[in-house]
């Protein structure tokens, strides 16, 4: 290490000392990493943290994403997903449709169903409670991970309930954990420009805090590479890190790169792969209290996701079964997001890592 970075300054040296002693770096140090530090310096530290936590283990699960509908009352400027009723590429699933999808995947031995969608103008808490009850009747062992904080707030408002009561009812019906979407950037000035109708920052954090206090774990995300500044990424992560210090309920952090296709934000170019990998590395360094960093491969592509395993990432999400359209509609290279379990294992192994099947709470199921 001393030979590799013998000319580093005092700030980098302080960061190294904190990483080696498992101490959190400061917001100012995180911003410094983005704005001033060498790409290889961040990669080295992120990989060191990853190896200390997990060695070469790389986690995945056998899951399916079901997006109930892309009808949505919001029209976020960055979104390529939402449609209005009657449009040819609009869909709207019912309970029977979801059960048919799960039945068609019985041979895959799925351990998780991940459910999200738009803010549907007619489907609120009762619809999903009925759906979860039916899923648990037919697939009692499957883990139901569902909803962003945005959806939870929407259901609560529509059904005139508190966030707490909404989550309790959903949990009693079969909800096991929350998804991490809808965070975008946790800065209300930025949110007013990219998603003005969406949940504000405090509400997003409060929904997750409430879920954690009720025994529901969750993930957390960051949509980056649009109008935010580099320091905004660190301030976003700082708010997540602060909540994790209180609740300990976040399982993993998922950086999501903004895709330019098919939306109204009118940003011409996407960030480079190098900046994407540096963002993963800094997330691993800064978020010392969140166990896992995930590369969501339907967004950034299989090979790029596997490449990120050398930059602090330890989780590849899952097999997914060609059932998500959020990023394919935004122009992702993965227009058919599906991997078999052997393909997932081979991809991880081809990059020098050890594939480990997990459940939704990161309990190891199989070491291959």
Image: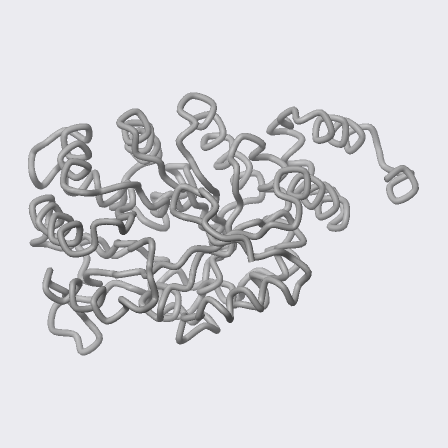
Q: Position of residue 18 (x, y in %)?
A: 71, 26
What's the image's color scheme?
one colour
Tally the numbered discs. Answer: 0
Residue 217, given in percent of the width and then of the height, sits at 35, 35
Work out whether residue 267 or residue 318 is closer to the camera in this orientation and state it.
318
- Residue depicted at x 36% and y 59%: 63
Note whether 173 is above or below 11 in the view shown.
below
- In the picture provided, is 295 more to the left or to the right than 307? left
Quarter the N terminus occupies: top right
Q: Residue at x 64, y 57 (%)?
A: 353
Q: Is residue 10 above or below residue 232?
A: above
User: In the figure, is residue 113 to the left or right of 305?
Assistant: left
Q: Quadrant of residue 331?
A: bottom left
The vertical placement of 274 against 232, above or below, is below
Question: Observer-nearest residue: 206 or 190?
Answer: 206
The image quarter in which residue 31 lies: top right
Q: Please state which of residues 28 and 106 is positioned toward the viewer in this rendering.
A: 106
Residue 13, given in percent of the width and then of the height, sits at 80, 30
**Farthest residue in the bottom direction?**
88
Which quadrant of the rendered structure holds the C terminus?
A: bottom right
Q: Residue at x 27, y 51 (%)?
A: 142
Residue nearest the viewer, comparing 20 with 29: 20
Residue 116 percent across, percent down from the top left: 26, 54
Q: Residue at image x 58%, y 32%?
A: 288
């Amino acid at each position: 290490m001393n030979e590799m970075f013998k000319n580093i300054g005092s700030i980098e040296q302080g960061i190294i000392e904190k990483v080696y002693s498992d101490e959190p770096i400061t917001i100012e140090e995180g911003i410094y990493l983005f704005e001033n530090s060498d790409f290889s310096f961040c990669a080295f530290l992120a990989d060191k943290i990853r190896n200390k936590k997990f060695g070469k283990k790389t986690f995945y699960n056998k899951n399916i994403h079901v997006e109930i509908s892309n009808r949505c009352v919001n029209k976020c400027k960055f979104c390529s997903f939402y449609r209005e009723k009657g449009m040819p590429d609009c869909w709207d699933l019912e309970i029977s449709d979801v059960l048919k999808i799960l039945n068609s995947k019985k041979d895959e031995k799925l351990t998780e169903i991940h459910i999200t969608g738009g803010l549907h103008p007619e489907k609120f808490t009762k619809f999903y409670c009925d759906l979860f009850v039916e899923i648990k009747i037919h697939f009692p062992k499957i883990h139901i991970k569902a909803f962003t904080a945005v959806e939870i707030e929407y259901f609560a408002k529509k059904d005139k309930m508190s966030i707490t009561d909404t989550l309790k009812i959903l949990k009693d019906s079969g909800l096991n954990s929350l998804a991490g979407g809808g965070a975008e950037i946790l800065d209300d000035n930025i949110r007013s420009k990219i998603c003005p109708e969406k949940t504000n920052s405090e509400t997003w954090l409060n929904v997750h805090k409430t879920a954690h206090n009720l025994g529901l774990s969750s993930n957390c995300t960051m949509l980056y590479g649009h109008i935010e500044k580099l320091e905004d990424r660190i301030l976003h992560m700082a708010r997540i890190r602060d909540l994790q210090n209180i609740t300990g309920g976040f399982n993993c952090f998922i950086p999501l790169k903004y895709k330019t296709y098919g939306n109204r934000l009118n940003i011409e170019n996407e960030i480079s792969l190098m900046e994407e990998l540096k963002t993963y590395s800094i997330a691993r360094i800064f978020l010392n209290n969140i166990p896992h960093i995930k590369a969501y491969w339907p967004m950034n592509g299989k090979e790029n996701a596997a490449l990120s395993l050398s930059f602090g990432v330890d989780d590849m999400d899952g097999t997914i079964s060609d059932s998500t359209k959020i990023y394919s509609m935004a122009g992702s290279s993965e227009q058919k997001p599906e991997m078999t379990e052997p393909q997932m294992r081979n991809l991880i192994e081809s990059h020098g890592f050890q594939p480990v099947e997990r459940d939704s709470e990161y309990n190891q199921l199989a070491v291959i």
